[in-house]
Amino acid sequence: MPANKLVELLLVKATQDEYVLDKLVADQSAPQVIFGFHAQQAVEKLLKAVLAHHGIEYQRTHRLAELVDLARDHEVQIPPFVEDLVDLTPYAVEFRYDAAPDEGDDFLDRADVRQKIQTFRDWVVGHVRG
């Protein structure tokens, strides 16, 4: 698939995860693991869109820190606040299939996470389309 088509596909897929986030951000009855999963997925797809834009090959991984490091290894300046989002990694697999944290432990500030993802999306869109 051509890089520009892959970038656009990844942006669309991230938007789909963000749609779920927008529905769950204020719904405290929705399980944290579901919100965390879609948050992790959105960030992962946004990072992969940046990598694809630069023609950087990446492994199939859900590890956000690995994707950030790969971008930086290729001198792509990912915004520093994205470091706060790498903590979402366990929601991709570990918490999805194994024991999840209790709601009181590792509590996600949903509004803060959603805002950071939106800010990152704005940066990614400007970066790949600008």
Image (cartoon, rainbow, N blue to C red):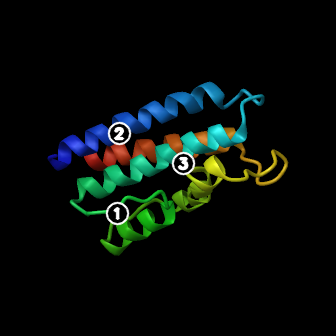
Q: Residue sitting at 43 percent across and 70 percent down? A: 69
- The residue tagged 1 is 59
Q: Position of residue 37 (x, y in %)?
A: 58, 44
Instruction: Give the residue type at disc 1.
Output: Gln
Q: Answer above or below: position of 90 versus 4.
A: below
**For residue 8, side relative to residue 12 (left or right):** left
Q: Earlier in the sequence, mark 2 or mark 3?
A: 2
Between disc 3 and disc 1, the foreground one is 1
Q: Position of residue 67 (x, y in %)?
A: 42, 63
Between 75 and 104, the one lying in front of the other is 104
- Say which element carries label 3: helix
Q: Are marks 3 and 1 in contact (CB under 8 Å)?
A: no
Residue 11: give its label.
2
**For residue 36, side relative to residue 16 (left or right):** right
Q: Position of residue 123 (x, y in %)?
A: 40, 47
- Say which element carries label 2: helix
Q: Residue sitting at 66 percent across and 32 percent down? A: 25
Instruction: Give the residue type at disc 3.
Output: Gln
Between disc 1 and disc 2, the foreground one is 1
Q: Are marks 2 and 3 in contact (CB under 8 Å)?
A: no
Instruction: Give the residue type at disc 2.
Output: Leu
- The residue tagged 3 is 40
State the CA–CA distance, disc 2 to disc 3: 14 Å
Classify 10 Å Cα crowding around label 1: few (below 14), some (14-19), many (20 and above).
Answer: few
